[in-house]
Amino acid sequence: MAIEKVDVFVTSPGRNFVVLKITTTDGVTGLGDATLNGRELAAAQYLKTIAPMLIGKNEDNIEDIWQYLYKGAYWKRGPVTMAAISAVDVALWDIKGKKLGVPVYDLLGGASRTGLLTYGHASGVDLPSLFDSIDSYLDKGFKAVRVQSALPGIPSTYGVAGSANAQTGKGEKGMRYDYEPARRTEVPVEEVWDARTYMNTLPGVFEAVRNKYGNGIALLHDCHHRLSPIQAARFGKMIEPYDLFWMEDCTPAEENQEMLRVVREHTTTPIAIGEIINSATDYLTLIKEQLLDYVRSAVTHTGGITHMKKLMDYASFYDIKSGFHGPTDVSPVGMAANLHLGLAIPNFGIQEYMRHSDETLDVFHTSYTFTDGMLHPGNKPGIGVEFDEKLAAKFPYQPAPLPVDRLLDGTVHEW
Ligand code: KDG
Ligand code: MG
């Protein structure tokens, strides 16, 4: 009963992933995800550095191993450290579930609901293409849809399929965007951003969508950190009539959490924040002052199930809910971890879901299901994902950094 082997894989079936496999002396294996989009090799190297420290440890003692890696590193927090700790943590929960013959959500207190409300990514370069995209999600059964739109005069915009640098996904022509593998270059692509054009465009887009689809579907939107606090405050107020489920990352809050106060004071549009926050401690002000409504962290970027469970329990006392990050750069292993935690916690809100490409799903065999707009992690022991190492070896890592944004005058801005 000890950890015998720790393997780290970097593979690129459709996009880059960092996979951790822990094997115990009695032959049980567990998987973790340490994918850090655009900085994958740093996370893989961190895992290789801590791998020898895990050998011989009792795999049952998840909390102790978590504390050992977190406090024992001396250098706490940070995306690379926390992605690596998350991978170890999820692999250990996977092992515990397999040893006990139960799905991980059972170990977390059992299911609190029958399924997880999920949202898909609709986008368009104009209203007709946006409506086509929304229709395709509604046809698949989604009850909640994220709406992103191109901006006049701006060649490519985050989250919009069909804009200049976006990638059309396999099997879903024109319906999705991905920043990988379209951008397999060592040096990032540069994009342009203009807040005035954005603020002048998006309210009209939401109005058109509500006029066409009515109030029955949940609409979400990602501002991707690009507005200043006062712009975000104004934007939230402008879009109130369209009843958004949330506006996401309206202004950067990972460095200065107090910036959200000004937004909160001016709008009742719900706020989701935190996909690049990597520690529960970075949420303390946000939660205590109720400056957010949804926690956006992914289990894989924020210390794993152990740390995220604590964070969500604390958030529950303030009626703050989950909205875990679930883009394709969270691997199927990480996605499964999100789902197990989401099914168990009382304060689940919604789960983001960008289906992985067929190439990715050939390497990762998942057992989570999507029915009528709801995801379920499945009932296999552990997290329920298998990894085909042989096939993964056929997809070597390729550099693919995220884009860099500049304002119209060339100033570097948040992407
Ligand atoms: O790696 C960056 C992406 O995960 C991010 O841009 C996606 O903002 C995102 C989202 O909401 O899914
Ligand atoms: Mg986002």
Image (cartoon, grey):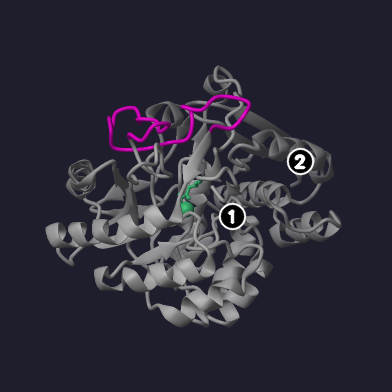
Position of residue 247 relative to residue 128, above or below, is below
16 in magenta? no
Could you say which quadrant of the image residue 171 lies in?
A: top left
The mark that comes first in sequence, 2 or 1, is 2
Q: CA distance from mark 2 to mark 1?
A: 18 Å
- Residue 137 x/y as whole percent: 24, 47
Task: Classify mark 2: helix, strand or loop.
Answer: helix
For label 2, the residue is 46
Can residue 143 be seen here? The reply is no
Q: Residue at x 64, y 46 (%)?
A: 87
Could you say which quadrant of the image residue 9 lies in?
A: top right
Residue lying furthest front in this view? Answer: 409
> Is ligand 1 within 8 Å of the beta carbon of the residue shown at mark 2?
no
Residues packed near mark 2 inside 10 Å, few (<14), some (14 to 19) or many (20 plus): some
Q: Is residue 136 rendered to the left or right of residue 222?
A: left
Residues packed near mark 1 inside 10 Å, few (<14), some (14 to 19) or many (20 plus): some
Can residue 403 be seen here? The reply is yes
Of the pair 308 and 63, the residue shown nearer to us: 308
185 in magenta? yes
Task: Classify mark 1: helix, strand or loop.
Answer: loop
The magenta region covers: 162-189
Amino acid type, callout 2:
Tyr
Q: Which mark is residue 276?
A: 1
Amino acid type, callout 1:
Ile
- Residue 262 x/y as whole percent: 52, 77
- Dominant SS of magenta comes to loop
Q: Of the residues tagged 2 and 1, which is closer to the observer?
A: 1
